[in-house]
Each structure stands twice: as C-alpha cells, then as structure tokens.
Image (spheres, rainbow, N blue to C red):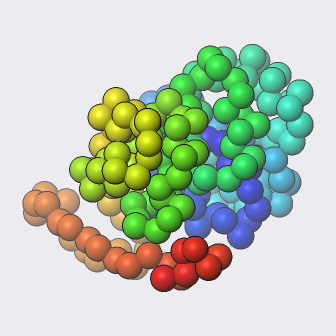
Amino acid sequence: MFFATGPENLYQFEQWRLPLEHLAEQRPVFVIVDRPDTGDRVLQMSSLPVVFARSSRELEELVADRDVRVVLYLNQIEANFRMLRFASPVHIQIGHGESDKGGSVSNQHKAYDLTFVGGDAGRDRLAHALRGFDAAERTLAVGRPQLDHSYPGAPPWPRDSGLRVWYAPTWEGDRPSIAY
C-alpha cells in the first residue's frame, strides 16, 4: 500500500488496517511511506511492515527489488503520481470509504487500473461523473471488507445475521468544495 501522507491522515489507513493485516496472512503486504513520522505511527498501530521511500530513486529500487505487482492507494493525493508512473504494477484505488463528497469522484480515478467500490452506487457515481471512464471495466465491487472485522465501538452484530446497510453522512471536509 502506498501511503505518502502525514500522520494526520492515519484515519484513512485505520479503515483498511484489519483487512490488510488479514490479507498479509496469505500474501506479502507492506506499507510504503515517505515520511518517518507516518512510518513510526503505522508501525505502532499495525503488524504490517513499513518501507520508507522518499525519493523517486528509492521507489524505483523498491519496485524492482521487491517485485511489486500490485499497489493499493487509500486516498487521492498528488504524491500518488510518484508511484503511478511505474507501468508494471497493477494500481488500485481502494479509497478510505464510500461517500458522496466531491473528492470521491475525481478524474484521478482514470489514472488507476482499477477502483474498488462498495457496490453499484459507487460504480454509478463514477460512471455518471467521469467522461471517458468505463466504470463497468475499471471498477470492482468489493463491499465493505472493514465490516468483516471487529473494531472498538462497533455494534456486536452476529456475523451470520444477514445483510446490513449502514449509511452515515460524510465528515465536514477540509475545503469549501466538500464542507457539507
């Protein structure tokens, strides 16, 4: 997972921490950071290994030496383009949640090979908003893998009790275009 941002955005990582730790039991998974403070915090809160790569040269060596085949992205930040320039890995935008805010529908989605969405609403949102984006081809509905794990404060739902729909309004945002 490529996570080139500051510790103030670790809430994005926390959304996927348990599913990624579970995946790491079957496949090699590590977190790439470009800031030591972010790396230290990821190490404190997770069992996933962390790789520090600040420069383009370090990223080139990492992709070559580690045989990186898939890169996951949690957010839509400019720094992602430093990793997206490598053609060989499959680049997947997993985001940090399904929401209706403007940042969830961005032309940046066109840069990724795939975008994971919760379901049809996410796919439809991208299909209707992005010109030239084939949402049927470029999205994969994965549900909310986060709900397969128990988090502090989560309701004690039995795992076999059927389908649940959980809707919550998005957060206030950090700029006027998404201050709902």
Quadrant (top left/top right/bottom left/bottom right) for the N terminus: top right
Image-based side of 149 in relation to 91, left or right: left
Q: Residue at x 89, y 37 (%)?
A: 55
The residue closer to the viewer here, 7 or 130, is: 130
Q: Residue at x 74, y 65 (%)?
A: 7
Q: Residue at x 44, y 42 (%)?
A: 131
Image-based side of 159 in relation to 30, left or right: left
The percent position of residue 27, horizontal first and vertical second, equals 50, 29
Q: Is residue 118 visible?
A: no
Q: Is residue 80 visible?
A: yes
The residue closer to the viewer here, 148 or 165, is: 165
The residue closer to the viewer here, 65 or 113, is: 113
- In the picture as drawn, the residue positioned furthest to the front comes out as 131
Q: From the viewer's perspective, is residue 49 above or below residue 149?
A: above
Q: Residue at x 30, y 43 (%)?
A: 141
Q: From the viewer's perspective, is residue 180 above or below residue 47?
A: below
Number of on-image labels: 0
Q: From the viewer's perspective, is residue 41 above or below residue 142?
A: below
The percent position of residue 3, horizontal first and vertical second, equals 68, 49
The percent position of residue 41, horizontal first and vertical second, equals 73, 61
The percent position of residue 79, horizontal first and vertical second, equals 75, 47
Image-based side of 172 in relation to 162, left or right: right
Q: From the viewer's perspective, is residue 78 above or below residue 62?
A: below
